[in-house]
Image (tube, grey):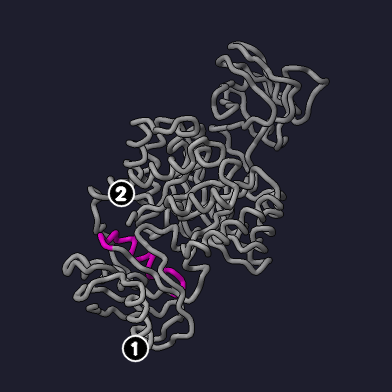
């Protein structure tokens, strides 16, 4: 059983039912829908296909809605701009006099935040400029390196203190759509503070929806405010693309380790994303550097790794997933299990389970978890046996498909007392022929089965 989970982005290469089914069989646990692309009709069809394939294969699979956020982009350009070092490029609040070397920007207000001497990057950092002279409605930039600039390319301001809401009007419309379609997880882009998460929650609450919220960390402010962001979010995504532009590529590996460590300590699942297997967009084989990158993310403590271009436009999406599975299985053989944390009241049961597990080497842990918290807290301590989650909610079961080491097991409804629960559990594991006679299992449950926050019991069960 692989303990680290796989998130795959759906795109033109994988948006058919057949492809989605093959991805699940290959090892995908969570499907990401990128709302920077596609329309609601397309996403609706994809959601329906994922639910259908998940049900067919009896594998709980979560759907992650990744909203666009305030990605700053330049406007339309006639053709392309072939820029040379020393050229003057004008960044304006709106297009000026059809000047060929003038580009507009999707958020005009950002021109006011740029100071003379600051860096302005375009096209994922491939074109670098410096602010030369500032005027009321535009700013002159001097180009630092050659490059080709085309319409709608991204713009980054690593040294500017920009104040733009992380939730745009488009995001609000997308959140309404996701709420109605019942997505399991929402990833909020360019999170700078806890207010960005609270805003997303407020919007979702207005539609009576409560998907889990994952904060994408891709700005300096996001890194600086990680404590307050973790307190309000349900998980993190280390979005290394824009983060690398914002802070400098050389700083990303250290920041990645810090973010993973903090998320682990808070029992919040953390996804590592961007260019995990980029070479496999066009090649059936990964590079050695990519394999090492994945292995290091796993050893750092990542709950999940994510594929983007590899499964949206790549030629080998299934091979990319199979490659991840092989690296995960090989790497977890040297993973340092049983992490040490100070146990508090809310996870004392989880800490005790980890201690028991280390001492008696059971075959598995089976946790009845109404909200998913108990299973998630047990996973925080990284035991070296599977954690099977049973719950009375399909939503919770799918959410747990993102959590390290947790195997979403089944939904059990209508059971209230522990003895009835254990009898039903015996029936299920006998039917599934999962364990051998004499195998020891650690069970966690509450004195009232199915009530959130009631887990207060550990039992040792022999098959």
Quadrant where the image shows the N terminus: bottom left
Residue drawn 66% across the image and 34% down it: 73
Q: Is residue 41 left or right of residue 55?
A: right
- Whole-angstrom CA distance, mark 2 to mark 1, is 36 Å
Look at the image and say whether residue 394 sits in the magenta stretch: no
- Report helix, strand or loop for mark 1: helix
N-terminal label among 2 and 1: 2
Residue closer to the observer: 261 or 397: 397
Look at the image and say whether residue 376 sits in the magenta stretch: yes
**Boundaries of the magenta span:** 370-385
Relative to 67, say whether 143 is above or below.
above
Quarter of the image for residue 458 reads bottom left
Relative to 285, say whether 458 is above or below.
below
Residue drawn 48% across the image and 59% down it: 234
- Indicate which disc residue 419 carries: 1
Residue 428 coordinates in the image, percent (x, y) = 37, 77
Residue 451 coordinates in the image, percent (x, y) = 46, 81
Give the residue pinned by disc 2. 329
Relative to 452, say whether 281 is above or below.
above
Q: Is residue 396 visible?
A: yes
Residue closer to the observer: 420 or 262: 420
- Report helix, strand or loop for mark 2: helix
């Amino acid at each position: 059983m692989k303990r680290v989970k796989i998130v795959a982005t759906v795109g033109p290469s994988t948006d058919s039912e057949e492809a989605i089914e093959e991805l699940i069989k290959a090892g995908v646990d969570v499907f990401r829908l990128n709302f920077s692309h596609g329309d609601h009709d397309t996403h609706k069809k994809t959601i329906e296909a994922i639910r259908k394939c998940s049900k067919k294969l009896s594998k709980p699979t979560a759907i992650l809605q990744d909203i666009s956020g305030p990605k700053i982009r330049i406007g339309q350009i006639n053709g392309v701009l072939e820029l040379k070092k020393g050229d003057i490029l004008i960044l304006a609040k709106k297009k000026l006099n059809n000047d060929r070397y003038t580009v507009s920007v999707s958020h005009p207000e950002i021109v006011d935040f740029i100071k003379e001497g600051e860096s302005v990057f375009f096209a994922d950092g491939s074109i670098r400029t410096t602010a030369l002279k500032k005027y009321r409605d535009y700013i002159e930039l001097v180009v630092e390196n050659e490059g080709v600039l085309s319409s709608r390319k991204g713009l980054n301001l690593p040294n500017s203190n920009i104040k733009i809401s992380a939730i745009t009007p488009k995001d609000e419309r997308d959140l309404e759509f996701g709420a109605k379609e019942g997505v399991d997880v929402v990833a909020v882009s360019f999170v700078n503070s806890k207010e960005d998460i609270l805003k997303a929650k407020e919007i979702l609450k207005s539609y009576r929806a409560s998907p889990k919220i994952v904060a994408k960390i891709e700005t300096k402010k996001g890194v600086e405010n990680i404590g307050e962001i973790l307190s309000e979010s349900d998980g993190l995504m280390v979005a290394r693309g824009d983060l690398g532009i914002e802070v400098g590529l050389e700083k990303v590996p250290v920041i990645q380790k810090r973010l993973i460590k903090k998320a682990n300590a808070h029992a919040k699942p953390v996804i590592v994303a961007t260019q995990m297997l980029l070479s496999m967009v066009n090649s059936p084989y990964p590079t050695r550097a990519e394999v090492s990158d994945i292995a290091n993310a796993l050893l750092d403590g990542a709950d999940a790794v994510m594929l983007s271009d590899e499964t949206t436009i790549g030629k080998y999406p299934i091979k990319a997933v199979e490659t991840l599975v092989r690296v995960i299985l090989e790497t977890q053989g040297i993973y340092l299990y049983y992490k040490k944390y100070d146990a508090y009241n809310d996870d004392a049961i989880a800490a005790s389970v980890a201690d028991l597990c280390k001492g008696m080497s059971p075959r598995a842990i089976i946790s009845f978890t109404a909200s998913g918290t108990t299973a998630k807290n047990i996973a925080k301590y990284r035991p070296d046996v599977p954690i099977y989650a049973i719950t009375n909610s399909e939503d919770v079961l799918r959410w747990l498909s993102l959590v390290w080491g947790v195997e979403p097991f089944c939904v059990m409804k209508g059971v209230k007392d522990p003895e009835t629960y254990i009898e039903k559990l015996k029936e299920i594991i006998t039917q599934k022929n999962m364990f051998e006679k004499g195998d020891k299992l650690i069970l966690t449950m509450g004195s009232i089965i199915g009530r959130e926050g009631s887990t207060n019991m550990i039992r040792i069960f022999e098959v």
